[in-house]
Amino acid sequence: MIIVCNTGPLIALAKLDSLALLKKLGFQRVLIPARVHKELLGKSSPESSAIEAALDEFIEVERLGATEQPVQAAASDLDEGEKEVILLGASIKDRVILLLDDQAGRRVARTLDISVVGTAGLLLNAKKQGLIAAVSPLLISLREQGYWLSDALLAEIRRLSGE
């Protein structure tokens, strides 16, 4: 399976020093579109060096392939990063999952029958595979670092993870 990532979740994983989970979770390829690449490089923050290392090591920048008009129309109101993530995901013929936290982007992906997961769901999968011990402390750390996570999401992840 291929994962196509948006900017926010990559920054979140970098804040947690957990970008390597994308490799450990067994994805064949970890892709980002050009817009996400530009957004990542334009960000100057403590996690920038971790992001740059992941870009050098295993995250690939992929050009957008041809997409059908209905896909373009469905994604037209999204911001450029989410739009390109969805267009790239829709153009890939292999099994693909999108890593998106933005609710509008996730909704569009679902209407197009493209699998989607958020940062919290990815961490939950990592726990299920034994790659991390707990999800809740990581999400709380993210929240303390300014990453917006709703109380409802935290409660649901606690329930699903048994924490």
Image: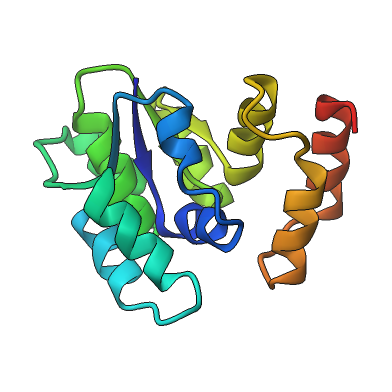
Report the side of 25 relative to 78 (left or right): right
Q: Please say which color scheme the image uses.
A: rainbow
Q: Image quarter for residue 135?
A: top right
Lateral position of residue 13 relative to residue 61, left or right:
right
Q: Estimate the x, y position of residue 109 in percent, counting from the top left.
A: 43, 35
- Viewport quadrant of the C terminus: top right
- Say whether residue 76 is visible: no
Residue occupying the point 82% across, 26% down: 160
Residue 146 occupies quadrant: bottom right
State whether residue 149 appears in this view: yes
Q: Position of residue 111 (x, y in %)?
A: 45, 29
Whether residue 46 sits left or right of residue 66 in the image: it is right
Q: In which quadrant is the N terminus drawn?
A: top left
Location of residue 12 by image quarter = bottom right
Where is 95 relative to 151, above or below? Answer: above
The residue at 58%/49% (across/down) is: 103
Which residue occupies the foreground of this view, 152 or 130? 130
Choose between 156 and 91: the one closer to the eye: 156
Residue occupying image coordinates x 31% and y 17%: 95
* In this rendering, position of residue 28 left or right of residue 78: left
Relative to 24, residue 49 above or below: below
Residue in the picture at 88% in, 30% down: 159
Residue 112 position in % (x across, y down): 38, 28
Q: Residue furthest bottom?
A: 44
**Residue 76 versus residue 42 in the image, above or below:** above
Locate residue 86, reporting x and y percent.
33, 41
* Total numbered badges shown on the rendered structure: 0
